Image (cartoon, helix red, strand yellow):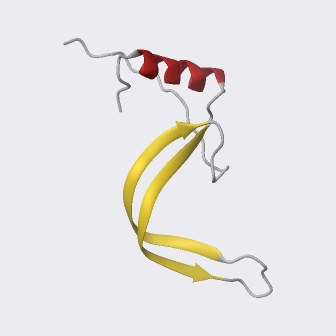
């Protein structure tokens, strides 16, 4: 995915490269899911089987801390 050549796009890249923004956030609507619990387990595990993805964003504080984001070098295309 190309980052927009705007001040906001450039600021996002700088923040990700510096590590200020290092997680991801996903906005979705659940269409189908499944809940399971291991024997003796205290927490239930939710498996998302089908969702409608609404938003994907780099963030500083994610709801799911096991996510991450990074910048990969890719030369900008000339127009």
State left or right for residue 53 relative to residue 47.
Answer: left
Which residue appears farthest toward the left when viewing the image?
79
Q: Left or right of 46: which side holds 10?
A: left
**From what the image shows, is residue 61 above or below residue 34?**
above
Residue at 66% of width from left, 42% of height from top?
Answer: 61
> Residue 41 location in percent, x, y?
78, 81
Q: Residue at x 23, y 11 (%)?
A: 78
30 versus 75 height, above or below: below
Left of 23 or right of it: where is 28? left
Q: Quadrant of residue 5?
A: top left
Which quadrant would the C terminus be assigned to in this image? Answer: top left
How far across and how far down the image is residue 74, in percent? 39, 21
Foreground pick, 36 / 31 = 31
Task: Looking at the picture, tell me which residue is in the foreground, 2 or 55.
Answer: 55
Q: Quarter of the image holding residue 8?
A: top left
Q: Nearer the viewer, residue 74 or 45?
A: 45
Residue at horizontal 33 percent and vertical 16 percent from the top = 76
Q: Residue furthest top?
A: 78
Q: Position of residue 15 (x, y in %)?
A: 59, 23
């Amino acid at each position: 995915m190309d980052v927009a050549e705007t001040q906001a796009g450039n600021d996002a890249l700088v923040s990700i490269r510096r590590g200020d923004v290092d997680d991801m956030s996903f906005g979705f609507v659940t269409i189908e899911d499944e809940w399971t619990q291991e024997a003796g387990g205290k927490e239930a595990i939710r498996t998302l089987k089908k969702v409608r993805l609404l938003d994907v964003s780099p963030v500083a504080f994610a709801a799911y801390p096991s996510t991450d984001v990074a910048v990969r070098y890719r030369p900008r295309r000339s127009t």
